[in-house]
Image: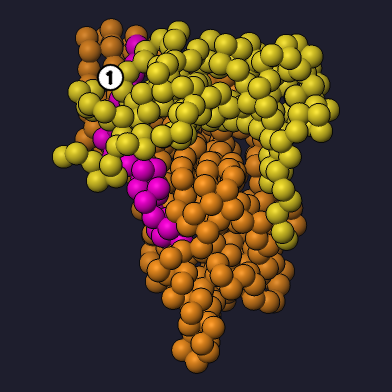
Amino acid sequence: MILNMGPQHPSTHGVLRVLLEIDGETVVRMMPDIGFLHTGIEKTCEAKFYQQVVPLTDRIDYLCPMTNNLCYVLAVEKLLGLEIPPKAQWLRVLLNELTRINSHLVWLGTHAMDIGALTVFLYCFREREEVLRMFEMVSGQRMMTSYFRVGGIALEPPLGFFDRVRDFAGYFPERVDQYENLLTGNPIWAMRTKGVARMTAEDAIALGATGPTLRGSGVDIDLRRDMPYSSYEKFQFKVPVSQEGDVFARYMCRVQELRESINIVRQALDGMPEGPIKADAPGIVLPDREKMKTQMESLIYHFKIITEGFAVPAGEVYQAVESPRGEMGYYIVSDGTAKPYRVHMRSACFANLQTLPKMCEGRLLADVVAAIGSIDIVLGEIDR
Amino acid sequence: MPLAPAITDLEQLKNHPAVARLLGWNADAVVGVKFDRDEMTVFVDRAYIREACVILKDDPACPFNFLSDVTCVDWYPAEPRFEIVYHLLSIPNKERIRLKVRLNSDSPVIESLTSVWPGANYFEREVFDLFGVRFTGHPYLRRILMPEDWEGHPLRKDYPVEGYR
């Protein structure tokens, strides 16, 4: 029988349609069908100035908006050859890790809810509420923050922001203990996730999986540690790797990543350098608002950047970051004008989705739901 | 930090391990090279792309065993029009390399890499869907992001941003 796990389904984490050919309870073949959220962001980017693309990038992987922002601005800064001041880099790391915590909280809540543990969802969203309020404090927006700019950060974080993050970092580890208390030793969770949707390391590499999907199968690669960007090399953190390759292994990877992320947040708070938050590049970075109102050159630069954009030297660049889902990359081709010629987003979930048929064929129908949750897909990133 | 100018001379770059390996295997396969902004790009001839990828994947010194990305750039109205771009990553050595193949607009056909990496499947379907480049040997070359009955290839430069509807 051919069953349609339609685009509108509480367990598909977005508008994913999965065509299942089942024989009783066993899945014989499955094929994901995507494209329901395709909005042509790559095409739209070609019609906008470089600084206007930043709000578009938020909406691609909407659960980790700052990571998208970071990847895009790092790529443009690589094209320009721009150096970013250390305070801006450390703030980017701090916010990137808070975003990773945010994203993993949504993953844990929804994944547990799909399998049946409904309480975990509410616990995770209680912490997420606090992080969203911190994002609102710093950028005015809860989710689509667009806080990073080409050349640094948009605004100074307000007074009280660092204290709030420090308070959060104080009580968050015991909250992670609460989630683990509910799930890790739970025999029902173990039966639903151990040995389910197993994938070997060779298959994962051949299919293009990255992130916890790959690290859950025993391959030790993390772009933050191995190809560091934005001063990640100054932070000490472990990269959790599991060997079994099943849903439980990927779950353990991500839960330990929650602990490592809050560790990085604490290190960033303790070592935050002083200095400017924007690079010294008047033709690219918007001037300070007060200077713009009183000095003629700043006014002219402001006007030129907003109305004409800044020209980027011709060339191409591929910049990849470690998003909560895997390797997110931006391939930007510039032809020397103020609008990008081609922007391609290498989304981690697009490649991770290819592992789904391999994981689920021959298994029970209920395991499909566990597998979809374990690879942590976000359709905004898949469909763009 | 000002940008260093791009190096495009094959003589200067032939000692890079991946380039040396490809030149050692078949000197006709490498049409050009570029080293710009700390990234290595190798222009490969269309006929040799699949074998070049196998050579790089099985290189014992620096195995590029992971296919990060397959995408395309449309240089309309310049010829050759399409440029298929492959990004490879070496997981043991933590190195990246970019391979590019140029295709003319009258024959946008290239061999599929699904026999080398099954993970190229969705990427090639997307390039077919949005640019119209056909991949021979692909197991299921259908539209992936646009609806099945869509006409036209949206990411081409002669397709308007606002669309036709």
Residue A241 locus on image (x, y percent): 65, 34
Total marks placed: 1
Circle 1 sits on which residue?
A19
- Of residues A250 and B103, the one nearer the viewer is B103
Secondary structure of the residue carrying numbered label 1: strand
Amino acid type, label 1: Leu
Give the magenta-colored segment's residue range: A29-56
**A248 in relation to A99, above or below:** above
Q: Is residue A363 visible?
A: no
Colour that chain A carries in the picture: orange
Residue A35 locus on image (x, y percent): 30, 32
User: Looking at this rendering, what residue extends furthest in the bottom direction?
Assistant: A294
Does the magenta-highlighted stretch encompass residue A33?
yes
Residue A117 locus on image (x, y percent): 37, 40
Residue at 31 percent of width and 29 percent of height = B153
Which chain is in yellow here?
B
Residue A222 locus on image (x, y percent): 65, 40
Q: In which quarter of the image is residue B66?
A: top right
Residue at 54 percent of width and 29 percent of height = B85
Q: Quadrant of the N terminus of chain B?
A: bottom right
Does the magenta-highlighted stretch encompass residue B138?
no
